Every structure is written in structure tokens, then in C-alpha cells.
Image (tube, coloured by chain):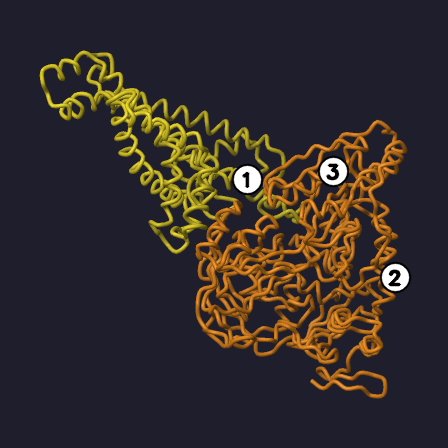
């Protein structure tokens, strides 16, 4: 287990190093002057040069990358040119907000899709299976930007039940989370439900379930105790991958509802060439991607005792 | 204020001086029906007459003085607008930055709802007969939020800082008549002597604690309007020494003080209670700007559900939606805001005038206005002077002429056409829609244009350098103002790199002519010159729209989208 964790940590560090170098290199390739972004388009060349020199931008790129890397390893993420504050000051609150959105969405998506998937998979081909499958396919095939428009039209403009923007400008308000969460749930639940359904159908068809049924166990007990845990293996990995998607894949939803989260921050930083914010966001994204993968592996082993870590045993 | 005729001459007492002699001519022209009411008020106020006095002569009450109901005090006025870094007013490049700061730091002059320059931190001004010396009397009894008294030192320090090339302020172009070009003694990368534009010696003079005099190299009629533009906010005399950062060190004379500021999120301003505001009652307790990003869906959703009370502006595509929402009013204002497809005369292939003329000849201006902006505006004529500008001179109507376009292309050595690329921003949509219309209109002549749509941040990084770009321009009260800012040789915002001494001379001349009709004749030449040189394709002047909740009173859409909330109140 220890060697597994160490291997994962090593892989994570290497991935972060490569990604950070690639991002830095790409930012260098984009034409245009960073000083123009900071001082505005009307600043004189003299003024721009002073800014570039004071902020170390006249050094070669590898040198600046080295300085950034050394600072990053000590927890200093640099200074945002758009927000004019240390990157951490804007990054952590934004990450916190996306975590709230992501956890809220998962809290709905996971129970809903697992229940739907199990219900559908228990009796393949039944009306309930067909109904859940069709709903799942339809909602998953509607992109977020379209469902966001439909839902806003219904709940904001027509029924006037919900607020149209989720800026949380007066502090956290749960009601502002409803529409973004609903859009994410609609988009995602069908996918996990169908994975669960397929997994459930496979498990139901196995000999040990047939044996359990034949020996007279109540159906409820067969499903919950024998089938469900085994049917969870495939959806569990998929759910773990959703965490990654909920971090940086929610840009569309955050942008549409003006939810000031991590995805929106990444977009703003990219549009404004805010290199240190982009680097920090990339590092967070890599960290979460690798960490969720590791968690998925551990959880997979827990659910499937045939898988063990390491090679010694 | 006493205004009276003596014989045929109009007299007014204003800090010990008679009114500018030309105003009595204006009044006579107005009474004879040769000058319309709007032109008279604009001309008279520009030369120092108060708007109230000018309105009194025309026998009309200005609209903002009409109050339909008793204002109610209190409340938080929540406005949806992008919150951008607003550290240094001198280098503002967006009206939004000025809007947050203007509640704290104020200008000497404000353009009101009627497009008329009114004294603000200035109590009044007076121009010399040759329009080269302008004396501004400053308002007394105004205090900064740190307790200091406002006075001439603040204005002198602020204006000198604008004119310093190290500041990089666009105000240097606005007040170019106070500057001069000097040789720095250095050689630039092209081997030419490096020049620098600096303040003329003695351009800004402190007369006494509340009087400042500006000495201009040439007459400039638009000086009061220039003092009203959004980067022309007066900062404290120690602004530069204290770090030149209004967000970290928010000292101002305005009715509000900054409570919270976060780029991309929100700005909160609370009513100042340390001393009574010089401008009388302020009704709002708080102004909150909320940034809804660049997706209009979030903003319209917030307006519909009452999360905000008003917005910065609505796009033409939203007009029907806003009209259909029962809680909102749609406020509309005809402006001199526009967008121009501008060609850089120093860049290939636009250094060939025939290519520019060919593009110009393909455009049907009326049709672009109808298709892109639903006809809500006025047709433009490729010279950046609007019919609502007082000095506008009508020129023969431009017509789409493909035969001429073919002739110009042949003369440019491109009889089989040419391929071009135009850069434009993704939002607002009307800008790229004009480009799309332009593409279609140019096709029949063999001009193939591809559009490079980019996010705002990327476009504004290259708006000065791209050979062919679509740039939006905000409203300015006078035509000469925008021509000085954008087309005079060598000024900061000259994005076409147009450099025509004859045109500069016409601008100088127009800026010195006080008679509205005479000035119009000079402007006719300047307009024709700009139009003939074909450096821009300008399709229309657009109306602007603001959506406001019905509980908002006293709000008017400003021609330059400025926010003046001192008399706004919430029911």
C-alpha cells in the first residue's frame, strides 16, 4: 500500500512538472506584451519597459520558469496581473466555491443515478428500464449550455421561482445553487445511471446470483447484499472521474450563471493571459486528476478483493 | 445669476466677469431661428454659461430638474457591470472603470442627460476670446474623504500628471493643446531622433487656491468636454506619492467611499457620512456593482429575478426580452457611440489608398444598420462625426458602388480581388455581426475577408497594431473631440496611424471657430477629407439601452454610459 502511494505521488509530481513547463512554454508562444495587459493599451513603451524590468519579464523564459517553480514549491503561487493580488487570495476562495458546487452536484447525482441504474438493471427490458434509459440518453445528449437556457426560461422567466444568476455576491445562498446543480445533474446522471444499469445486468446474470435466488433468498436481499456491491465497481471508477470533470469541466455552467468558481477563474485567466493564475489552476487540476485516480484505485480494491496493491504478496 | 440684455448684448455676471461675447451672438441667432435650441445650449455652456441660464434663455426647463415624485432615502442600488481593475484613473481605458471611481473621485465637468457640459468640481469656466486661455473657477467647500480641502493644488497636480509621458494617460491626447513635442536626444530603433510629448512650460497655472488657468498652444473648443471624459477624474494632490492606487488608497471628493472591491466580482460603495456632500442630498445608502462576466444570460437572469436593479447596458438583441419583462423599464438613448472597421494606413495592403477605397465602396450603410442593429440608430458616413454633434455637416450620401470598387482594385493592381483578414471581438455580438455583413458586401467585388473573432482581452492587446480591425468607440459630446483623439497625427489612440498635416490644420481651425455655422463649414472639409482618405468604414451610430427595475427613479441612460447616481433613488 505504501509503495503504491509513493509511486502515485512520484507520478503526480512528474506530471505536474511536465504540465507546468508545457503551460509556461505555451504562454510564451502567445504573441503580445504582458505589460499591455497590466498597464492598458495606451501605456507608453517606456512605461511598459519599466514594468517588465521591475517584474522580471526581461529575463529569459527558462529563468522565469525556474524562479516560478522554486517559489511554487515553497507555496508562493505568484501575483495575478488581472486581479492585482497574490494568486492564492483569489484561487482558494474560487476553488472552495467550485467544491461546494461539485459536492452539491455529486450529492444529487450519485444517489439518483445509482438508484435509477439499479432499478433499470434489475429487470432488463422492463418498462421502467426503458423509461430510465430513454430519459438518461435524452438528458445526457443535451449540452449544458442548452439545458441552462431551458431551465432558466422555465424557472426564472416563466415561473419566477429561482434567481437567474449565482454570483453569491451577498454571501452564500443555497437557492442560487439550484439551477447550476440541476444543469450538472441533468447532464451527468444519465451517464452514471446507464453505467450502473449495464454493470447491474452483468452481475444479475452471474451464477452466484442465480444460486442466491434459487436457494430462496428474498429478492431484496439478493439485490442489496450480493448484486449491488459488485455492480458498484464500474460506476465507482466513473464517479471518481466525474470529480475531475466537476473541477474544470464546469466552465460552461459557471460562466452561464456567473458563478465565481474555479472554472470561471481559469477562463478569465486564459482570456487575460494571467500566467501565474493559469499555472496554479493547471497544477490544481493535475493534482485533483491524479488524486482522484489514486482514490479510485484504492476504492476499486476495496470493492473488489481480487485486486491487491503491490507485488510482494 | 443675473442674465440680461443691454441693447443687443446679453450680459451675465459670473465671478466678476461678463459672459463670453460670442454668447450674445448665439442668443440672437437662436432668437432669429438660425440656431436650434440644442446647438444654442451646447455652444453657450461650452463658453462658460451655466446650463440653467442657457435653458432659461430658451424658455425650457431641463428634463433632469423635473422630479415626478418625492425621492425616498436609503437602499442599496445594485448594478450589473464588469468590475475591472480601477487603480489609476489617468490610465483608464474602459468606461466601467470610470463608473466605479466616479462615485469617489469626480471630474471638473460632467456631460448631463441632455449631452450638455455642466460644471461639477468646477464652479464655472471662462474662455478667452481666442479660446487659448481657459480659466476654471473651482467649487469651494469641497472636502476630500481624508479631511483635506479640495482646491487648485489638486487640479494642477492631476493635470500635470496626465501630461507627463511616463503616466501613459490617454488624457495627453485629449489635452494635446497643452503639450509640445521635444527631442529626447536619443535615437529610436529605426535610426530616427526619438521625440517625446511633454507638457508645455506654464500650461497649467494656479491662479489662487480655487482658480486654475490653462494656457493652450492652439484654440480648443472642446476643453470642457475633455475634462468630462472618463479618465479625467481629479485625484488628490498626493495621489502619485501615495502609490497611485485608488483602490488601495481610496481618497475622493465624491458622495461615496469604497467599501469593498474585487476585480471580476463586485465593488461596494457606501454613502459618505464624514461631511455633508457639496452636491446636496444623496438618496442612496449604497451602490453595489456585481460582475456577471461576459455571458449576457446571467445578467438578464439577475435582472428578471430582481437580484440587480439595473445594468450597464443591454445589447440590441435583448431589447425584446427586456420589454417583455413586467418588472423592467427599457431606457434608450441615441448616441454618438459607434464601431469602425479601420484600416491601418502604414500596414500592407492598406497603405494603398485604392484598396481602402474599394472596401469603402462595397458598403451599404443603411442596410448594415437595418440588419445588424434593427435600425435603432443613425446611418454613419465614414468620417466619425455624428448627426447629434453640434458641428456635424451633412455630406453627399455614400452609396454602394461595385463598379467603383472594381476600378479601385484595378488601380491598386489587384483586378482579380484581394484576400483580407479583419480582427474583431467576440462580444458584444453586434460588432462581429457588422464584420459578417461587411464580408458579404465585399464578396461581389472580389474582396474576400476572413474574420478573426477573438476574446476582448486578446483584441485589446492588438487593437493599435492590427492592419484591419473592428473597434468600438464611445460617445463624445463634440465631433472635434473624437477626431482629435483618434485621427490627429501621432496621438495615443490613433489606431489607423493616419498622419495628415492638412487634416490636423483643419482640426486646429475648427477648434478655434466659435460660430457654430462657420465651424460647420470647416468640419465639412475635415469630414470630406477623412471620408475621401477611406481609413475607416463606419456603418452606423448606435442607440444604447439600459434595463432598470421599475423601482429605480432618477436614472437616465448616459450617452457615454457614465453613471451619475447622485440623484437616483429607490421606491
Residue where numbered disc 2 is placed: B521
Task: Answer with the quarter of the image where residue B137 lies.
Answer: bottom right
Give the SS element for disc 1: helix
Label 1: few (<14), some (14–19) or many (≥20) C-alpha neighbours in 10 Å: some
- Name the residue at the left extreme: A216
Whether callout 1 and callout 2 share a subunit is answered no
The C terminus of chain A sits in image quarter: top left
Q: Nearer the viewer, residue A171 or B502?
A: A171
Q: Nearer the viewer, residue B181 or A289?
A: A289
> How far apart in space, not on screen, are marks 2 and 3 (Cα)?
32 Å
Give the secondary structure at mark 3: loop
Mark 1 — on which chain does it sit? Answer: A
The mark lying in front, picked from 1 and 2, is: 2
Give SS at disc 2: helix
Tell me the yellow chain. A
Which mark sits nearer the N-terminus, 2 or 3?
A: 3
Is there any visible trace of residue B421 in the rendered image? yes
Circle 3 residue: B467
Q: Residues within 10 Å of mark 2 (few under 14, many from 20)?
A: some
Image colour assigned to chain B: orange
Is the same chain shared between marks 2 and 3? yes
Please give the chain letter of the residue carrying mark 3: B
Report whether B445 appears left or right of B241.
right
Q: Badge 1 is on which residue?
A: A271
Q: Where is residue B237? Give x, y as percent.
A: 59, 66
Amino acid at each position: 500500500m505504501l509503495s503504491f502511494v509513493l509511486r502515485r505521488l512520484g507520478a503526480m509530481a512528474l506530471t505536474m512538472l511536465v504540465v507546468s513547463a508545457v503551460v509556461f512554454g505555451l504562454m510564451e508562444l502567445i504573441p503580445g506584451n504582458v505589460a499591455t495587459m497590466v498597464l492598458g493599451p495606451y501605456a507608453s513603451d517606456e512605461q511598459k519597459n519599466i514594468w517588465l524590468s521591475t517584474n522580471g519579464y526581461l529575463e529569459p523564459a527558462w529563468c522565469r520558469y525556474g524562479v516560478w517553480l522554486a517559489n511554487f514549491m515553497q507555496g508562493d503561487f505568484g501575483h495575478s496581473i488581472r486581479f492585482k493580488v497574490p494568486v492564492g487570495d483569489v484561487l482558494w476562495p474560487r476553488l472552495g466555491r467550485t467544491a461546494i458546487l461539485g459536492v452539491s452536484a455529486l450529492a444529487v447525482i450519485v444517489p439518483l443515478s445509482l438508484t435509477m441504474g439499479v432499478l433499470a438493471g434489475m429487470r432488463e427490458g422492463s418498462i421502467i428500464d426503458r423509461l430510465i434509459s430513454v430519459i438518461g440518453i435524452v438528458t445526457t445528449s443535451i449540452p449544458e449550455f442548452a439545458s441552462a437556457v431551458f431551465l432558466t426560461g422555465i424557472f426564472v422567466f416563466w415561473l419566477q421561482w429561482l434567481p437567474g444568476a449565482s454570483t453569491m455576491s451577498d454571501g452564500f445562498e443555497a437557492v442560487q445553487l439550484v439551477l447550476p446543480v440541476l444543469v450538472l445533474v441533468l447532464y451527468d446522471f444519465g451517464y452514471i445511471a446507464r453505467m450502473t444499469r449495464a454493470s447491474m445486468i452483468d452481475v444479475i446474470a452471474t451464477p452466484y446470483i442465480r444460486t442466491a435466488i434459487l436457494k430462496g433468498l428474498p429478492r431484496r436481499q439478493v439485490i442489496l447484499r450480493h448484486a449491488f456491491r459488485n455492480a458498484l465497481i464500474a460506476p465507482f471508477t466513473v464517479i471518481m472521474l466525474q470529480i475531475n470533470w466537476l473541477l474544470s469541466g464546469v466552465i460552461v455552467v459557471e460562466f452561464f450563471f456567473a458563478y465565481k468558481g474555479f472554472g470561471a477563474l481559469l477562463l478569465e485567466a486564459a482570456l487575460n493571459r494571467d500566467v501565474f493564475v493559469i499555472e496554479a489552476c493547471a497544477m490544481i487540476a493535475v493534482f485533483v486528476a491524479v488524486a482522484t485516480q489514486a482514490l479510485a484505485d484504492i476504492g476499486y480494491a476495496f470493492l473488489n478483493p481480487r485486486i491487491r496493491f503491490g507485488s510482494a504478496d | 445669476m443675473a442674465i440680461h440684455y443691454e441693447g443687443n448684448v446679453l450680459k451675465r455676471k459670473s465671478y466678476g466677469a461678463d459672459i463670453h461675447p460670442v454668447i450674445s451672438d448665439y442668443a440672437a441667432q437662436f432668437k432669429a431661428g438660425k440656431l436650434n435650441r440644442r446647438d444654442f445650449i451646447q455652444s453657450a455652456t461650452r463658453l462658460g454659461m451655466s446650463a440653467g441660464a442657457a435653458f432659461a434663455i430658451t424658455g425650457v426647463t431641463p428634463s433632469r430638474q423635473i422630479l415626478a415624485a418625492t425621492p425616498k432615502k436609503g437602499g442599496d442600488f445594485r448594478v450589473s457591470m464588469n468590475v475591472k481593475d480601477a487603480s489609476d484613473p489617468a490610465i483608464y481605458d474602459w468606461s466601467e472603470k470610470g463608473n466605479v471611481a466616479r462615485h469617489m473621485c469626480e471630474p471638473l465637468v460632467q456631460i448631463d442627460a441632455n449631452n450638455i457640459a455642466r460644471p461639477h468640481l468646477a464652479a464655472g469656466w471662462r474662455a478667452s476670446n481666442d479660446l487659448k486661455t481657459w480659466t476654471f473657477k473651482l467649487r469651494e467647500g469641497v472636502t476630500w474623504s481624508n479631511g483635506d480641502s479640495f482646491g487648485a493644488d489638486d487640479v494642477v497636480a492631476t493635470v500635470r500628471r496626465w501630461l507627463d509621458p511616463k503616466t501613459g494617460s490617454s488624457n495627453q491626447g485629449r489635452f494635446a493643446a497643452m503639450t509640445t513635442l521635444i527631442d529626447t536626444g536619443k535615437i529610436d530603433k529605426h535610426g530616427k531622433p526619438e521625440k517625446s510629448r511633454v507638457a508645455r512650460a506654464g500650461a497649467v497655472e494656479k491662479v489662487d487656491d480655487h482658480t486654475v488657468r490653462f494656457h493652450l498652444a492652439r484654440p480648443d473648443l472642446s476643453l470642457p468636454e475633455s475634462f468630462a471624459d472618463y479618465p479625467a477624474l481629479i485625484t488628490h494632490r498626493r495621489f502619485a506619492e501615495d502609490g497611485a492606487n485608488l483602490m488601495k488608497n481610496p481618497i475622493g471628493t465624491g458622495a461615496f467611499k469604497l467599501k469593498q472591491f474585487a476585480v471580476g466580482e463586485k465593488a461596494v460603495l457606501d454613502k459618505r457620512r464624514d461631511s455633508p456632500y457639496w452636491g446636496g442630498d444623496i438618496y442612496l445608502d449604497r451602490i453595489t456593482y456585481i460582475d456577471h462576466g461576459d455571458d449576457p444570460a446571467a445578467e438578464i437572469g439577475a435582472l428578471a429575478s430582481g437580484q440587480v436593479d439595473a445594468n450597464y447596458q443591454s445589447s440590441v438583441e435583448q431589447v425584446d426580452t427586456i420589454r417583455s419583462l413586467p418588472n423592467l423599464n427599457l431606457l434608450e438613448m441615441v448616441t454618438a457611440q459607434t464601431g469602425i472597421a479601420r484600416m491601418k494606413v502604414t500596414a500592407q495592403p492598406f497603405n494603398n489608398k485604392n484598396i481602402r477605397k474599394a472596401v469603402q465602396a462595397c458598403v451599404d450603410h443603411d442596410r448594415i444598420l437595418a440588419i445588424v442593429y434593427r435600425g435603432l440608430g443613425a446611418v454613419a458616413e465614414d468620417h466619425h462625426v455624428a448627426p447629434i454633434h453640434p458641428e456635424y455637416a451633412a455630406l453627399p450620401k455614400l452609396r454602394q458602388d461595385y463598379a467603383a470598387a472594381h476600378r479601385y482594385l484595378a488601380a491598386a493592381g489587384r483586378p482579380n480581388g484581394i484576400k483580407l483578414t479583419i480582427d474583431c471581438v467576440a462580444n458584444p455580438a453586434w460588432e462581429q455581426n457588422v464584420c459578417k455583413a461587411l464580408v458579404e458586401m465585399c464578396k461581389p467585388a472580389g474582396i474576400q475577408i476572413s474574420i478573426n473573432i477573438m476574446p476582448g482581452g486578446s483584441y485589446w492587446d492588438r487593437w493599435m497594431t492590427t492592419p484591419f480591425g473592428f473597434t468600438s468607440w464611445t460617445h463624445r459630446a463634440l465631433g472635434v473631440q473624437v477626431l482629435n483623439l483618434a485621427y490627429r497625427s501621432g496621438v495615443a489612440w490613433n489606431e489607423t496611424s493616419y498622419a495628415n498635416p492638412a487634416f490636423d490644420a483643419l482640426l486646429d481651425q475648427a477648434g478655434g471657430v466659435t460660430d457654430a455655422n462657420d465651424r460647420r463649414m470647416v468640419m465639412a472639409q475635415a469630414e470630406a477629407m477623412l471620408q475621401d482618405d477611406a481609413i475607416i468604414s463606419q456603418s452606423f451610430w448606435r442607440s444604447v439601452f439600459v434595463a432598470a427595475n421599475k423601482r429605480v427613479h432618477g436614472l437616465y441612460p448616459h450617452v457615454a454610459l457614465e453613471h451619475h447616481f447622485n440623484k437616483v433613488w429607490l421606491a
